[in-house]
């Protein structure tokens, strides 16, 4: 094999190695981002459930107040 061929092969291998390293780093970054997004989604789901419960309680209190006002109006 000619020295130029060996140099070209060595260069190709270095380029391939660099691309593989970039791919590995991209996979690590995406895995980390995915975990972060899952955590955020869980937090938002919990927050949503709390807000839905607060809304339900507020609605019940308002309905009770309306019923009391209607009863006062009738008497």
Image (spheres, rainbow, N blue to C red):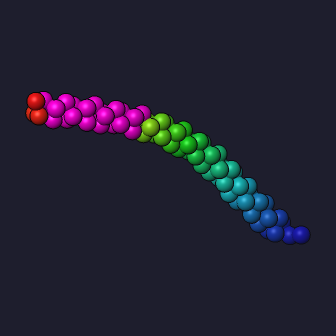
Taking the image as shown, residue 34 lies to the left or right of residue 24, namely: left
Quadrant of the image for the C terminus? top left
Pick whichever, 29 or 7, lies toward us.
29
For residue 17, above or below residue 46: below
Pick whichever, 30 or 7, lies toward us.
30
Q: Position of residue 55 (x, y in %)?
A: 33, 37
Number of numbered labels in the structure image: 0
Pick whichever, 71 or 41, lies toward us.
71
For residue 41, above or below residue 18: above
Pick whichever, 8 or 33, lies toward us.
33
Q: Within the image, what quadrant is residue 28 found in?
A: top right
Report if residue 59 lies within the magenta region.
yes
Q: Within the image, what quadrant is residue 56 found in?
A: top left
Residue 62, visible in the rendered structure: no
Report if residue 51 lies within the magenta region.
yes
Taking the image as shown, residue 11 lies to the left or right of residue 37, namely: right
Q: Residue at x 15, y 35 (%)?
A: 70
Q: Residue at x 70, y 59 (%)?
A: 15
Q: Position of residue 37 (x, y in %)?
A: 53, 44
Taking the image as shown, residue 18 lies to the left or right of residue 56, namely: right
Q: Position of residue 13 (x, y in %)?
A: 77, 60
Quadrant of the image for the N terminus? bottom right
Farthest-out residue, right: 1
Farthest-out residue, front: 75
Q: Residue at x 74, y 63 (%)?
A: 12
Q: Position of residue 25 (x, y in %)?
A: 64, 48
Q: Residue at x 16, y 32 (%)?
A: 71
For residue 65, above or below residue 48: above
Residue 74, visible in the rendered structure: yes
Q: Main secondary structure of the magenta part?
A: helix
| Magenta-highlighted residues | 50-72
């Amino acid at each position: 094999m000619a020295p130029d061929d060996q140099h070209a092969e060595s260069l190709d291998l270095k380029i391939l190695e660099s691309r593989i390293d970039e791919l590995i780093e991209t996979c690590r970054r995406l895995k980390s981002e995915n975990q972060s997004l899952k955590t955020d989604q869980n937090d938002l789901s919990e927050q949503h459930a709390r807000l839905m419960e607060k809304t339900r309680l507020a609605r019940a209190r308002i309905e009770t107040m309306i019923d009391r006002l209607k009863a006062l109006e009738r008497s």
